[in-house]
Amino acid sequence: MAKKPLNVGMVGYGFMGRTHSNAFSQVNHFFDVPFRPVLKATCARDAAKAKAFAEQWGYESIETDWRKLVERKDIDVIDIASPNDTHHEIAIAAAKAGKMVMCEKPLGRSAKESRQMVDAVEKAKVPNMVWYNYRRVPSVTLAKQLIDEGKLGRIFHYRAKFLQDWTISKDLPQGGQGLWRLDVDVAGSGVTGDLLAHCIDTALWLNGGITKVSGMTETFIKERHHNITGKTETVGIDDASLFLARFANGSLASFEATRYARGHKALYTFEINGENASIFWDLHDLHRLQYFDHRDEGRTRGWRSLHITDGDHPYMDKWWVPGLQIGYEHTFIHQVADFLGAVGGGKAAAPTFRDALATDLVTDAVLRSAKTGLWESANG
Amino acid sequence: MAKKPLNVGMVGYGFMGRTHSNAFSQVNHFFDVPFRPVLKATCARDAAKAKAFAEQWGYESIETDWRKLVERKDIDVIDIASPNDTHHEIAIAAAKAGKMVMCEKPLGRSAKESRQMVDAVEKAKVPNMVWYNYRRVPSVTLAKQLIDEGKLGRIFHYRAKFLQDWTISKDLPQGGQGLWRLDVDVAGSGVTGDLLAHCIDTALWLNGGITKVSGMTETFIKERHHNITGKTETVGIDDASLFLARFANGSLASFEATRYARGHKALYTFEINGENASIFWDLHDLHRLQYFDHRDEGRTRGWRSLHITDGDHPYMDKWWVPGLQIGYEHTFIHQVADFLGAVGGGKAAAPTFRDALATDLVTDAVLRSAKTGLWESANG
Amino acid sequence: MAKKPLNVGMVGYGFMGRTHSNAFSQVNHFFDVPFRPVLKATCARDAAKAKAFAEQWGYESIETDWRKLVERKDIDVIDIASPNDTHHEIAIAAAKAGKMVMCEKPLGRSAKESRQMVDAVEKAKVPNMVWYNYRRVPSVTLAKQLIDEGKLGRIFHYRAKFLQDWTISKDLPQGGQGLWRLDVDVAGSGVTGDLLAHCIDTALWLNGGITKVSGMTETFIKERHHNITGKTETVGIDDASLFLARFANGSLASFEATRYARGHKALYTFEINGENASIFWDLHDLHRLQYFDHRDEGRTRGWRSLHITDGDHPYMDKWWVPGLQIGYEHTFIHQVADFLGAVGGGKAAAPTFRDALATDLVTDAVLRSAKTGLWESANG
Amino acid sequence: MAKKPLNVGMVGYGFMGRTHSNAFSQVNHFFDVPFRPVLKATCARDAAKAKAFAEQWGYESIETDWRKLVERKDIDVIDIASPNDTHHEIAIAAAKAGKMVMCEKPLGRSAKESRQMVDAVEKAKVPNMVWYNYRRVPSVTLAKQLIDEGKLGRIFHYRAKFLQDWTISKDLPQGGQGLWRLDVDVAGSGVTGDLLAHCIDTALWLNGGITKVSGMTETFIKERHHNITGKTETVGIDDASLFLARFANGSLASFEATRYARGHKALYTFEINGENASIFWDLHDLHRLQYFDHRDEGRTRGWRSLHITDGDHPYMDKWWVPGLQIGYEHTFIHQVADFLGAVGGGKAAAPTFRDALATDLVTDAVLRSAKTGLWESANG
């Protein structure tokens, strides 16, 4: 059947610009969805970079001002893959222009920004989604299925962490391309918005709402050379962020994110302990899920290492054959597939802007608690 | 810089047709190579299937007779992704037509077929390559680098196995689409050509030539329904194939392949033990390499689990960021990238047809030894 | 050389009575220490149980009143392996009687009790030790060595947890033999004193003092049948206990203990991240230590799984040959060996009562913080 | 109840002398068996060494001539823990003297020696056992239970290996204490009798008889200094030994042993693949068993890592609590417990001398096949 074209206007050409472009390019090779994304235009302030990116990925045209992109009649969806400080303005403008809006996470630099973005897309009634891609790792999606089916029973514990080690060197500067995540004005926060936000999004999805948190943050390296000002400046981001939490369902949780955990590149892990079963997942082996079921016969009861490559695992019937794993970028392809399916069916594609706001309310509470030393409500 | 187009004519639309098409589609998104593959035509006997495949992957045209494809002037490279019994005829015709030839493994159904194919491409002086894709898993390529740098020292042992479990059921038929691997006339052999061939290709690449083998094969299920004849027929393939071997460098080896190892989907593993260091790899976690170096200080000496996602790992500077793994299909993208680079530079791209013939000489010797009960030479 | 006998008076015949008795029985088979422990007397209120225990382990005599044991002239060391509510009284009496005192952990039911016990042994100047046995797992001792040698550099993070799942059933009663750990009057607290105390002892040893904590506790099952009163009674212990902490060296930490983590029997783990290297350990594979050293060459840098069975690993030259692991009870044998060596050399054997008090100050602060919702000082 | 004393006469004071002595010392602390082993006498040619050993382990007396030990009226069981070349003579003499005989593995240096030893004990009708201790690793015993219950179904594959790396250095001498395993006259063979014999004993126990084998051996270091002659002498042992095999039940197998696998200290592993389930075990983590059951629901089917520390696991109700592992030497304690139980019940304790002969028939066939290059029968 002929698929309806969906014209994409992309803002950003960095790491996330690549993952999103790849997702739009690949989705029709593997998924049967009602739309065929067309890479209509990409936008970057630097025309040479925009051109190079367009050539590499097959974008038909370029823009150097996102406002022009938003105004173009031939664009159906604006995809925001630029740094955090641009999300708020672009998303609101795109919504006002009646475009569908896809936005890289975190939604805003604060819950305040995010709330305005939610208001904009809801008022404009445009399809919207935030790229919390880890929901679409097949093993994570399977975890969601198992939990929703009640396999775990009453939940007692949730624990998640996201460990990296790439900013340990004192010689690493802050700011500018590739390093804007260390510049608090651009990023909004450090690991709290960059890494903890992923952990929280998954947690809210799998285990429901968080009621209160007690947080602790640290900036280990206090000053760094700033690439844009050219001076040594105080580092405003948090290098590490930990918190304890209570979920509405009564379970207890601990969360941690850091860029100072030597030996870990992108070790996002979560574990959830229920009355009858437990689940553990780890981004460094994202194609596996660890599952323990207490109902197994006693002598042969143990943690099962599930190799999530079978046809009955989420999304995997679309890929290769059992035993052959997929990787990181596939999560974005799945997200586009689900978005296109949802739009085609007139449904919302989670996580919506509103879903992502819930995460920002928690990160805001964590940062607030780290300052006050008190337990803070995560309900905004 | 503008890239030269390279027109691809694809034969086959199954599992391998998909991995190859994906590789051609993706290579320019990630690799800086001198050619831009153009999906010019795909070929299948069934026009409807050819059309559907062309639409899914963006092939510009279809053919239903591979002979016509081979004769087309607008085709630069013939890629053979159809069942084993077609490799010989198509490859030789393509070579005669002056096309570059890429052929799915194993090269022929026997060393005899393969030798004729080698003669054809060498006589025609056309670039040629066989899709032994596992050489291009970044962790396997790293193994090759470490061995070539002499990190392991004198080699004592090599052991490899490829374990699957998908044919255990007696109710599984043989023959026809998706099941031609169980039909000896089409496949040439069972796991020996399908799985052991992968193990042997890697072994010859990493550890040099094999001199002699002692083999053992078994067909556990003796009769199966045949999808094409409609009758219950004797199964001609080997379900399991094991052999002991001597390498020219004096090392001892054991190899095994089976489709009757319950619990394993595609567990290709190899280990190589040298005087100073050892390496272990496993397809189920293909993004890792296990490495032991005896030169480490005694108390902290142990097997290192290398997460092959860093920029200084082979191919990985082209993908994402440290910690984020790639998957199975990327090996084919790497192979296309290397092929295009080699062709652009006027060099051969390994494994050539000649390289693949060496593997077939070993598989032939294994099957011969399994019949004679004697050690057989693997030198053809 | 002839070894000096050291007469042991044991209080308790349960789980810990067995591990201690085994340690005294075995130490001279494997370690060259200046004393030969003699199992002189064991004490239990129930004479039949005391007799059975004495027969099983070879104790020469029994007592049914610990006060008599403490008064006996032929006893050199009183070993307290009875429930927590007996530690305080027996230890102080033993010290007053001039006996060496070994006490199972936690030292007291509260820091207040512990401080009085410290005062007693220090006033009496008697050798004293608390059985925080996990310091003597060879892999943990190796971790201490590596840290003390500066291999890790500046420490950023410490995280530990102790997960069990044996009290999830609502039908499990509290109180009485084997279940006194669920009776708050006997145990003092729940997992905080039972499990977290182990994590804290190791942490203080490896990473120095803790300055402040933010804690959270929960009792999931609020009422249980009480074996002694025969009634359903409110459960006074904490089932789960988590806390965030700051160490004096500036590192951030999270700790957790629970008996509601389905799938984990005794999963005590800790990880410590330093500027140059990291260490991870896990009680379920206690014979291994995971070590990551950033100074390794980039391509072959990875977590090393050290199999702690070599002669140059702590304690292991006394056991078997490389590759052959030891188990849980060996930690107690090591502790006796170190105690006897220290006593022979006129030195203190860590952890002393004073060392153990430091742990109780932290556990007290955690319980206090869980009530106040505030960060609490852990310095007593 | 009062236990009957069983007087032990021990020959040998090396590695195995220690494991056996420990087993006799410990068995009554943990197991309820009808006998109480008494360490009556130990025997070594060197009186000083015998005395030191007796003092360490509590033997009541010493002998310097095993013939005297065998003749002593106060000895019930002769335990042979001395090098392989002494087994034959001592065992036959002990049987003739009417003693129970326990013998370290392998039984003889060849099947010929072993057969005579079997004849002797069977003629004398004395209880006899060979110390193939790995049968009594609880995880291995559990494997046996699961197989015997039919959990695996029809068996297709068995593979085992025993990898070490301690003889790689050319500077290691052969012969003399601690190194007699490298002296072919003393040991009988190299890794075939030392390591493969363990693999074969387990295999025969778990999977039944082996019918034929194709073997390959190698001696990597051809000459070594001999500690006894003081000269450089040809090395007569095999450094590596591999074989393919057929079991009587139709399953295919591969076996390997080597002391040249860098990175492995005592990596004995076996895997068995059945129609419905598979099992994998590994001596480096002997407290675990890997189990895969195809009957699990598809999405959550995976290899289960069983932590063999629960009360319903073989032998484990006698030790500590769930989660706390035991080690290597416990396997000998279990073997003594089973031996004493069998003797008390008038039954044979496996593996008997006859059971061990079956293993030697296989090792003989492997060595023979390595010479002839032919498949050899393993039925003697």
Image: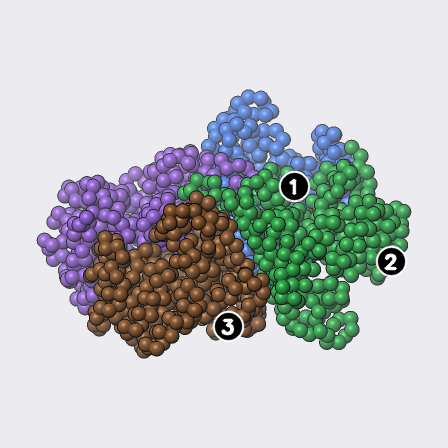
Chain colours: A green, B blue, C brown, D purple
Name the residue rendered at 71%, 49% in the picture.
Answer: A355
Q: Which mark is residue C8?
A: none
Alpha carbons under labels 1 and 2: distance apart: 37 Å
* Residue C363 visible from this viewpoint: yes
When asked about the image quadrant of residue A15, the answer is: bottom right
Q: Which mark is residue C379?
A: 3
Name the residue rendered at 74%, 29% in the picture.
Answer: B48
* Residue D288 visible from this viewpoint: no
* Left or right, residue C75 beside residue D209: left
Alpha carbons under labels 3 and 2: distance apart: 58 Å
Mark 2 closeness class: few <14, some 14–19, many ≥20 residues within 10 Å? some
Residue at mark 2 = A65
Residue at mark 1 = A315
Given the image, on which type of amino acid does mark 3 rest?
A: Asn
Given the image, on which type of amino acid does mark 2 rest?
A: Asp
Q: Chain of mark 2?
A: A
Q: Chain of mark 3?
A: C
Above/below status of A330 relative to C131: above
Residue nearer the viewer, B140 or C159: C159
Callouts 1 and 2 on one subunit: yes
* Left or right, residue D94 beside residue A123: left
Q: Choose mark 1 or mark 3, whichever is in front.
A: 3
Name the residue rendered at 26%, 61% in the picture.
Answer: C65
Residue nearer the viewer, B195 or A65: A65
